[in-house]
Structures are given as C-alpha cells and as structure tokens.
Amino acid sequence: MQASRRLDVNFIRLPIPMLSAVLLAGCIGGFDVAHPNVLGNVQSAATWEGFGYCGGWGCSDPSGTSFTPTEWAEVVAVMTPAAPTPQAEREQVAQAVGLMERFIGPKTGYDRDLAGTGAGIFQPGQLDCYSEAANTSNFLHLLNNAGLLRHHQPADPIMRGLATSRSWRGTHATATMTETFSGVLFAMDSWFFASGHDAVFVEADTWANSWAPDGGASL
C-alpha cells in the first residue's frame, strides 16, 4: 500500500513527456512466474493414479484425487496416435485438459465452475485463475510423466497484469509448456471457459499482452 501511495504522488508531478511514457508503459505486456499460491500447488511428479487438485480462491481448497483406469484410457486415447507436429500436440493437450476436467470436476465439487471468475464469484464450486493455473500445470505434468508429450515440456505457470507490476491490466495466471524444438513458451489456459471445455493456447508473449480467446470470459 505504501508503494501505491508513493506512485500516486509522483505520478501527478511528472512532466508531460514523462507522463506519456508512463501511460504507455501501462499498456506494455509481460509476465512473471506465478504467485506462490500457484507454484506451491504444482506437482512435477503428478501421475494419473494420484495428484493434487486446487479448489476455491487461490488454491484455498486443495484436495487429492485420481483418475480411474477407464478414465485414464480415454485421456490416453486423446493423445494417441502421437501428434506429428507441435501444433497438433497442443491441440491434443487442449482437448485432454478439457476431458480431465470433466472427470475430476464431479469428484471434487468443481464441475460447477463457470467461465472466468466473475460469473460465479462467491458461489460454491467456482475456481479462480490461480487454481486453474495450478490444476492445468498438474495435468501437463501427468501427461508428460506418462510419456504422452513428444513435442513439449511442462514449464512454470506464469502471471500477467497488476500483480506483476508490468501492467495496469487485470491480474491473470495460466499454466505453460515449452515447445521442445523451438524453445517457445506457450500458455495453456483453462480459465476462459467453463469446466470441461477444451483449454486454449497461445504463445506466452502474446498471452501476456492481455490476450483472450473469442467467446471467452473477460477479466
């Protein structure tokens, strides 16, 4: 809060050219590693037989869960045959994330999760972007640990907006994975649509600049 007050005082004293530069800086994208509430709930050793699932706001309602062998076989089927290209694999992963949400939602009480956060705010069964980012990160790790990712590796979840001090736009977090051949980081975001919908993906640098998919929730 003290930093915010200092910013307000200094802001009104800035000369016009410098003030313009500050205003432009507020529109610049960028991302940081996600909040500890997200990172602390990412399990790099997650497997389909058992992993953590975040619920509530900021992973305030964590639980342990798993897939049945039948459920997991359906996930594997989405990822089979192996994708011939990184783009095709991202499409497979986006579908697999949606399917995994459809299986886990009823087990955890979060099958009622609506798109975004605002539409379901304060309602039972609603997830925020922190919980979504942690859960999708764990989905990516369990896919990888099962040998189902050929063109990507899971990476740390990231965040954009006010919480990063890089932008005055709304704070948002997402899971990510790195394309192995190119090294390009991609956001794999499950927050914009309701539980069970395919995740959406885009290069992280694009995502950081307030990107949102057509028809998705707004911040």
Image: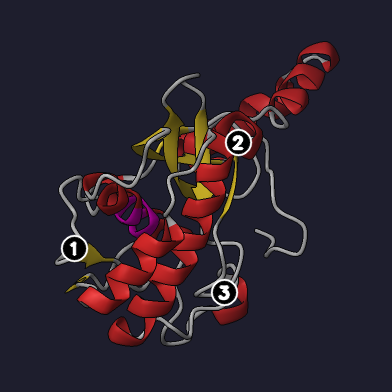
Please name the residue shown 52% across and 35% down the image.
Answer: 86
Please name the residue shown 27% across and 78% down the image.
Answer: 70
Measured as percent of width and height from the top left, residue 215 is found at 76, 64
Marking on residue 51: 1
Q: How far is the residue under mark 3 from the one under mark 1?
A: 22 Å
Magenta-drawn segment? 134-139
* Main SS of residues in magenta: helix
- Relative horizontal placement of residue 100, taking residue 20 as reference (left or right): left
Amino acid identity at mark 2: Ala
Q: Residue under circle 2?
A: 208
**Residue 8: quadrant of the picture:** top right
Measured as percent of width and height from the top left, residue 65 is found at 20, 74
- Relative horizontal placement of residue 151, taking residue 70 as reference (left or right): right
Q: Secondary structure at mark 3?
A: loop
- Res. 118 visible in picture: yes
Amino acid identity at mark 1: Phe
Q: Earlier in the sequence, mark 1 or mark 2?
A: 1
Q: How far is the residue under mark 1 from the one under mark 2?
A: 28 Å
Q: How far is the residue under mark 3 from the one under mark 2?
A: 21 Å
Quarter holding the C terminus?
A: bottom right
Q: Is residue 32 a member of the stretch shown in magenta?
A: no
The residue at the far front in this view is: 81
Closer to the camera in the image, 154 or 180:
180
**Residue 108: quadrant of the picture:** bottom left
Q: Nearer the viewer, mark 3 or mark 2?
A: 3
Q: Residue under circle 3?
A: 194
Closer to the camera in the image, 46 or 112:
46
